[in-house]
Amino acid sequence: MKMMSRLISSLFCLSLVFASSCYTEDPVDIPVNQVEPSTDEIDQFIQTEFVDKYGVAVRYRFVDRYVDPTRRVAPPRRELVQPILDFLLEYWIEPFLEVPNGEQFFKDHVPAEIVLIGSFIFNDDGTVVLGTADSGARITLTEVNNIDETDPVWVSRQLGTIFHEFAHIIHQRYNLPANFQQISPQGYTSLGSWFTLTDDEALRRGYVSPYATSTFNEDYAETAAFILFDKDFFDNYIEEENCTTPACQERNDGRLLIRQKFNTVIEHFRQNTGVDLLEVRARIQEKL
C-alpha cells in the first residue's frame, strides 16, 4: 500500500443524519461486583487486546455521549469495529512496541479511552473534525464506516489523525519544546482561518499543512504526525535547486523552517520518552 504525501484537509457541505438508535443502552446502575464478563466477541477482543494489555477502553456504542450535543454523527457499524481495531493494532500500536523503549512508552502514554465514530464530525464553518484528544485521556477517531485499507486517502486521514492526536498527549504532558514557538512565529493564522490556505502557502510559511498554522500545539502535532505517516516527508522538504523566483525561494525558506521543526520534535521525543520517532517511522513505512 502506498501513502499520499499530504494529509488532506477537506471542506464539506453535507447534511448528516444522526443515528442514535443503533444500539440499546446498557443499564448503568448495576453494582460492579455483579457485572458479568461480556460474552460478545467484540467486547472480548477489546478486553484482551486493549484493556488487559494497555488499560485502554474502546467505546463504539452510544457515540452521542462523546461528542458535542450540537453535532450530529453516526456510530460505527458493528461489523467494522473489529477491522478498525486491527488497523490500529497494526499501524499504531505495533510500530511502537517494535522499537527500543517503545513498549513502556506506549503503556505510559496511551490514552484511557479510544472512541470510534462512524461518520465525520462537522464544525459550523463546514470544516471536518478528523479526531480529538481530550487532556491526554481520550482519542476520538471518525470515519470508521468508510474503512478501506486500499484507499490511500482514507489511510492517510486515519494515520494522520491517530498520530496527530497521540502527539497532543505528548506535548500536554511535557509541554512544547522550549524553542519550538520561535521557529516560525509570524506564520500562524488561527483556528478559524487556517483552511483558507493552500498547501503551497502553508509550505512557504514553514508548515507541513494548512492546519499546522492554526496554533503552536497543532503545528507540533502535525509535524510529529507527518514524520510518522508521510512516505514522502524527507523528499518534500529538500530544497529546490537553481531557484530564480521569489516563490521558489519562499518555498525553500519554508522547507528550512520545517526541517528545524523536524529536528526539534525528534529531539523532544528522545529526551522526554526515550523513543526515536525515526525508528517508529521505519516500522510504519514497512507496513504500508
Image (tube, grey):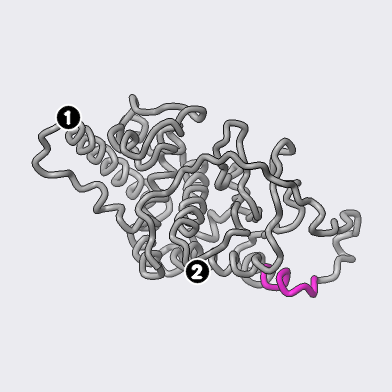
Q: Nearer the viewer, residue 178 or 87?
A: 87
Identify the residue at image location x=37%, y=36%: 198
Residue underneath mark 1:
246
- With 239 as the anchor, is 113 left or right in this view? right
Location of residue 180 by image quarter: top left
Q: Which residues are magenta?
A: 38-46
> In 3D space, how far apart are the residues under numbered discs 2 and 1 (Cα atoms)?
43 Å
Q: Main secondary structure of the magenta part?
A: helix
Is the residue 197 above or below the residue 92 in the image?
Answer: above
The label nearer to you, 2 versus 1, is: 1
Mark 1 residue type: Pro
Identify the image quadrant of the N terminus.
Answer: bottom left
Residue 261 percent location from the top left of the image: 31, 41
Measured as percent of width and height from the top left, residue 196 is found at 43, 30
Image coords of residue 171 (percent x, y): 47, 42
Q: Secondary structure at mark 1?
A: helix
Q: Is residue 43 magenta?
A: yes
Q: Quadrant of residue 95?
A: bottom left
Residue 90: assigned label: 2
Q: Quadrant of residue 76?
A: bottom right
Seen at 81% across and 71% down, the residue is 37
